[in-house]
Amino acid sequence: MNEEWIRAFSDFTGTINDWIDNVRGYLAAALGIEDPIKILPYRGYGSPGSITVKGRVLKDEGVKLREENAPLWENLWNMFKRFATDEVEGARIQAELGDVSQEAVTDKEGFFEAELRWSPGPDSTHLWFPVKLNLLHPDKGDMEEDPVINQSEVMVVRETASFGVISDIDDTIVHTAATDLLKMIQIAYLGNARSRRPFPGVAEFYRALQGGKSTADNNPIFYVSSSAWNMYDVFEAFMDLNHIPKGPILLRDAELALDNLLLFEHETHKLQMIQPIFERFPNLPFLLIGDSGQKDAEIYRQLAKQYPGRIWAILIRDVLPNDAERQQQLASIQADVEA
């Protein structure tokens, strides 16, 4: 199956999917059974003077945080609703931080991004600041009893930070067996935020990195994964439940299109998420943390060459100790980085 055929077929199925979405929207409006709109905020980041706020506007499918021992069918139903999203294109969002506000418009997949020109007060030592998100459009008038409002958070990185941390999630923080498809599906998609378990010592280690030498450095931590944005609430809840330090969670748009599934490249995605962080904070060195199961070592080697002197250390959790070929590859990468 060649790449050109895959993309052509994906375009065709994408057109069919758009048609189905439109028909579903018209029927829901005609029958008066539309789900309420919700704003799903993503933790943003920035530096004094420039803050990026992100999120998504969707129809509320009623996804709930399940108990640890929730039955399989509840987890499956939750996962289905999480991926069967009904996006709201063209919605207008107003982001408010302090006395500054900025509007943003959602794209075809319901995503929005707003850039705010704002700085914390000179005496402020906080790392996180609340951002209020208001839905300006679509306005349902009397049909909507309460305005659609949510609150996001943004991490403001200061010059006092000693270093930043960029970390993978799957098989780095939480065991997901990413190298074994069936086990990964069982852990990642048939469980929930409460049933997942971090590796021992992860929370304490990441809190120590954030605190730094003074224990109050407020070193920023960024989490980057190739998992879909549809899983964002699971990751956020998992980290909060296990006391892992907060940080922006950067995922990928995983449309159920053939080209997205078969031609997706982990390296390209992660570089696209990580490079803007290096560019936004040009004077900040970084620690890079990942695992040996996929291509984290290769990605971090490329970053080390692209940003010489900016990377203090690369830490790789070895999840394939018995794979001789992979061990040889890792040794070669290590030698290349250290040369």
Image (cartoon, grey):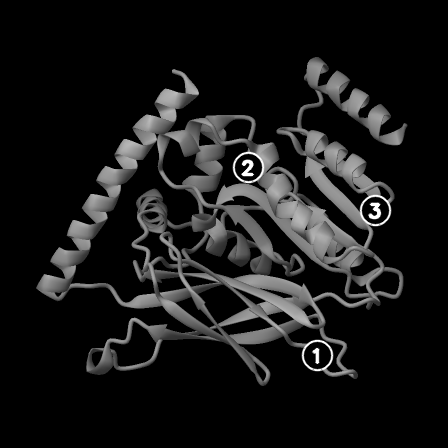
Q: Position of residue 102 (x, y in %)?
A: 51, 74
Q: Which residue does the numbered mark 3 point to in the structure image?
A: 310
Q: Position of residue 252 (x, y in %)?
A: 50, 45
Q: CA distance from mark 1 to mark 3?
A: 26 Å
Left or right of residue 77: residue 172: right
Residue 193 visible to the viewer = no
Q: Which residue does the numbered mark 1 point to in the structure image?
A: 120
Residue 198, disc: none
The secondary structure type at the circle numbered 1 is loop
Q: Nearer the viewer, residue 177 or 16?
A: 16
Q: Earlier in the sequence, mark 1 or mark 2?
A: 1
Q: Which residue does the numbered mark 2 point to in the structure image?
A: 176
Residue 142 sits in quarter? bottom left
Residue at (69% x, 34% y) in the render:
299
The secondary structure type at the circle numbered 3 is loop
Confirm or deny contact between disc 1 and disc 2 (CB under 8 A): no
Residue 111 visible to the viewer = yes
Confirm or deny contact between disc 1 and disc 3 (CB under 8 A): no
Residue at (43% x, 49% y) in the render:
230
Residue 246 sits in quarter? bottom right
Q: Earlier in the sequence, mark 2 or mark 3?
A: 2
* Type of amino acid at the residue the image marks with label 1: Pro
Q: Is residue 139 above or below residue 4?
A: below
Q: Position of residue 126 (x, y in %)?
A: 72, 75
User: Where, quadrant-wise, is the N terminus in this rendering?
Assistant: top left
Q: Is residue 167 above or below residue 294?
A: below
